[in-house]
Image (cartoon, helix red, strand yellow):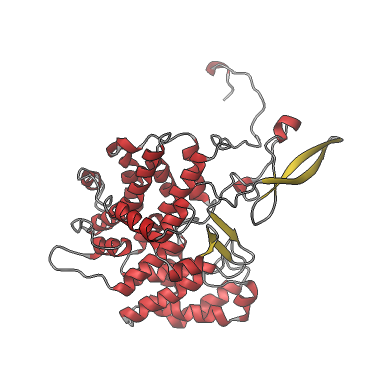
């Protein structure tokens, strides 16, 4: 969908002087945020490339989906503040918003929920894929495989040039990802798979597929279902991060949508990206007990000690992570609802949170607890092992990946991704036969 607010207008030019020659590079203006220098003609005019490892100062696309201002602690989905969506809306509304650009009316919401609900079952033969993995396989390795395998089962929705097939593929992935994730969880703990139910909401259905067993009835606690729903909302999209950029890069080659999402899952698996909440829980395990917290606080303040508090501060947000406020309240709601008093890690988490919010060092350095800190606590309280944390992240992020992929497909300016490089290897050399090479 093309946003009515999208501009991309030229507002002036940046002047670059190379070897005495002046080059004018257009300045482009978005609806909000800094202007960008359009360097598309730079190589043609100068024979030079830009050098930007990690692309941290480079816009690879224009997008109308998500906006982040890390200095101000702002995160907007299609212009809506993340805290308003998470506190007042639900994940299905959020998914519709990210896909189509506007919140649905009552009729649109009903039709969308119906379409997603009736796509939640997966092909029965997919069970064979799970059973081909070792019993102790990491759930993320399973997810990379089975999501990519969807292209083998749904041939009628792999033609990216057909808008209807793209829509069907999008709905299928949003609908089937909870089923696939729950199956990965069940397989990892040696329990039978649980089929989805059409009378349950998105988050309810997922929790039931994860924690129900054939031996007894299972009723989802509404407080826990709401917590799961908020978790999905808060992690649904986050602009052009590593996994989203991977989805776009894979999609730029014309790859089918299932393969693109599998590529995003593979990227998300990296500990520097999707593993932050797992790292936060591992840190709490390392601390172990409340009485050891002062020791680790002192280590965190010692610039010569490599120890870092995981789940505090954020690379993008130099202010408070806007998602953390909602996740903080959600984590406390879950802990209060479950009445968990015997988990030492959660005691450590609560005390560490209190100290971080009161200690002048943390306040001055803006090392506030971030969304990963609270989401890790919440997922542990819900009953998920740390190996499932990144799987839940992938489940949340699927709708954002699909929205970004769809936007890319519709963008007439988008080309196949082809970053350039600063070559530092040998200059041209002559081939020497094996017998003439010196040992």
Where is residue 348, by image quadrant? Answer: bottom left
Question: Farthest residue toward the left?
Answer: 215
Residue 369's place in the image compared with 202, above or below, is below
Residue 115 in percent (x, y) is at 31, 51
Query: On the rendered structure, is 426 left or right of 178?
Result: right
At 64% from the left edge and 54% from the top edge, which residue is drawn?
A: 31
Query: On the rendered structure, is 409 left or right of 361?
Result: left
Residue 171 in percent (x, y) is at 35, 48
Question: Farthest residue toward the right?
Answer: 20
What quarter of the picture does the C terminus occupy? top right
Residue 67 in percent (x, y) is at 57, 57
- Closest to the observer, 167 or 328: 167
Residue 261 in percent (x, y) is at 41, 45
Residue 54's place in the image compared with 217, above or below, is above
Q: Is residue 40 visible?
A: yes
At 29% from the left edge and 39% from the top edge, which residue is drawn?
A: 154
Q: Is residue 288 visible?
A: no
What is the tally of numbered marks visible in this picture? 0
Residue 327's place in the image compared with 202, above or below, is below
């Amino acid at each position: 969908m093309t946003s009515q607010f999208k501009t991309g207008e030229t507002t002036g030019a940046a002047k670059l002087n190379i070897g005495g020659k002046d080059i004018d590079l257009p300045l482009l203006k978005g609806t909000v945020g800094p202007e960008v220098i359009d360097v598309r003609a730079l190589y043609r005019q100068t024979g030079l490339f830009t050098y930007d490892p990690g692309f941290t100062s480079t816009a690879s696309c224009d997008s109308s989906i998500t906006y982040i201002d890390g200095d101000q602690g702002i995160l907007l989905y299609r212009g809506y503040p993340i805290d308003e969506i998470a506190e007042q809306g639900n994940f299905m509304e959020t998914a519709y918003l990210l896909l189509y650009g506007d919140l649905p009316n009552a009729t649109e919401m009903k039709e969308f929920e119906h379409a997603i609900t009736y796509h939640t079952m997966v092909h029965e033969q997919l069970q064979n894929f799970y059973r081909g993995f070792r019993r102790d396989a990491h759930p993320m390795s399973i997810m990379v495989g089975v999501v990519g395998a969807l292209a083998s089962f749904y041939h009628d929705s792999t033609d990216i040039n057909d808008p209807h097939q793209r829509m069907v593929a999008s709905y299928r992935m949003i609908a089937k990802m909870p089923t696939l994730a729950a199956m990965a969880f069940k397989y990892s703990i040696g329990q039978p798979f649980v089929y989805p139910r059409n009378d349950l909401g998105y988050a309810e259905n997922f929790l039931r597929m994860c924690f129900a067993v054939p031996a007894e009835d299972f009723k989802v606690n509404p407080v826990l279902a709401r917590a799961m729903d908020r978790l999905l909302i808060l992690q649904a999209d986050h602009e052009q991060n590593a996994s989203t950029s991977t989805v776009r890069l894979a999609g730029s080659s014309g790859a089918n949508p299932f393969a693109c999402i599998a590529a995003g899952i593979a990227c998300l698996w990296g500990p520097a990206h999707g593993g932050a909440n797992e790292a936060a829980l591992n840190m709490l395990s390392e601390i172990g007990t409340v009485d050891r917290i002062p020791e680790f606080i002192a280590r965190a303040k010692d610039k010569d000690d490599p120890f870092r508090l995981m789940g505090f501060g954020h690379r993008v947000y130099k202010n408070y992570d806007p998602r953390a406020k909602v996740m903080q309240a959600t984590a406390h709601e879950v802990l209060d609802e479950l009445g968990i008093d015997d988990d030492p890690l959660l005691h450590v988490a609560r005390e560490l949170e209190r100290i971080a919010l009161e200690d002048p060092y943390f306040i001055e350095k803006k090392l506030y607890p971030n969304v990963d800190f609270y989401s890790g606590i919440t997922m542990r309280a819900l009953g998920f092992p740390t190996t499932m944390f990144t799987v839940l992240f992938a489940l949340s992020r699927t709708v954002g990946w699909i929205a970004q992929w769809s936007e890319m497909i519709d963008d007439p300016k988008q080309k196949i991704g082809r970053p350039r490089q600063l070559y530092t290897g040998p200059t041209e050399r002559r081939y020497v036969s094996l017998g003439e090479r010196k040992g």
